[in-house]
Image (cartoon, rainbow, N blue to C red):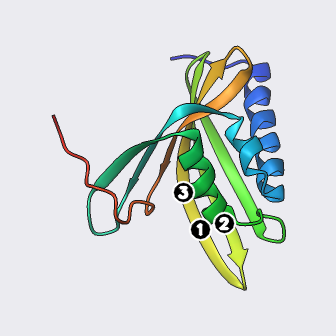
Amino acid sequence: MYQPTTEELQAVDAWFAAYDALAERGAIEELADLAVFPMNVATDVPGGHAVLKQWTREEYVEAMGQAMGGGTAGLELSSVRTPRFVSANLVIVETEATMTIEGQRQSMHYADLLVRTEDGWAFQTMVQGGWGYGWPAAKRG
């Protein structure tokens, strides 16, 4: 099993700090600069089945613009991230997050696959339940 160095763990933490700062401002295009496209998206429809898509940059920008609106500033948001290195160049990061929107506290659990590129870490796969309304169900084979 790959054991990351302290520097590798710090680099992933720094990447998420930069991501969170951009998300807070609603800087969707700059968030897209931190990704590799096409981006894999794995989700589901509650009560249904898994659904999968590959987003282009444009599709990502549209979806995140709808989800984040003007950004996350003003939300009471806290996240605990657990990186699990597959290798020196691949890390799956599980996130447990809570946010308060208009007095309502919501919890989320999701994961991202980060890949090390020549320009540093980038996210390539997002996994989170509940985004797949209207998407076709995943099929085997």
- Residue at 34% x, 68% y: name it: 46
Residue sitting at 27 percent across and 55 percent down? Answer: 136
- C-alpha gap between disc 2 and disc 1: 4 Å
Q: Is the residue 131 above or below the residue 52 in the image?
A: below
Q: Amino acid at mark 1?
A: Ser
- Alpha carbon distance from label 2 to label 3: 9 Å
Q: Is residue 89 shown left or right of residue 128?
A: right
Snapshot quadrant of residue 111: top right
Q: Is residue 52 placed above or below 65 in the rendered structure?
A: above
Quadrant (top left/top right/bottom left/bottom right) for the C terminus: top left
Q: Nearer the viewer, residue 2 or 39?
A: 39
As helix, strand or loop, the secondary structure at mark 2 comes to strand
Residue that protrudes farthest toward the left in the picture: 141
- Residue 103 is drawn in which quadrant? bottom right
Amino acid type at circle 2 is: Thr
Question: In the picture shown, does residue 101 fall above or below 129?
Answer: below
Give the residue type at disc 3: His
How far across and how far down the image is residue 30, in percent? 77, 42
User: Which mark is drawn over residue 98?
Assistant: 2
Image location of residue 130, percent across then percent down: 43, 63
Q: Helix, strand or loop at disc 1?
A: strand
> Gap in Å between the C-alphas at discs 1 and 3?
7 Å
Label 2 neighbour load within 10 Å: few <14, some 14-19, many 20+: some
Answer whether labels 2 and 1 touch (C-beta < 8 Å).
yes
Where does label 1 land, which residue? 107
85 versus 95 height, above or below: above
Q: Residues within 10 Å of mark 1 (few under 14, many from 20)?
A: few
Q: Nearer the viewer, residue 123 or 136?
A: 136
Q: Position of residue 81 (x, y in %)?
A: 66, 45
Circle nearer the N terminus (2, 3): 2
Q: Give the residue pinned by disc 3.
A: 109
Query: Do the CB atoms of the residues marked 1 and 3 lie less than 8 Å apart?
Result: yes
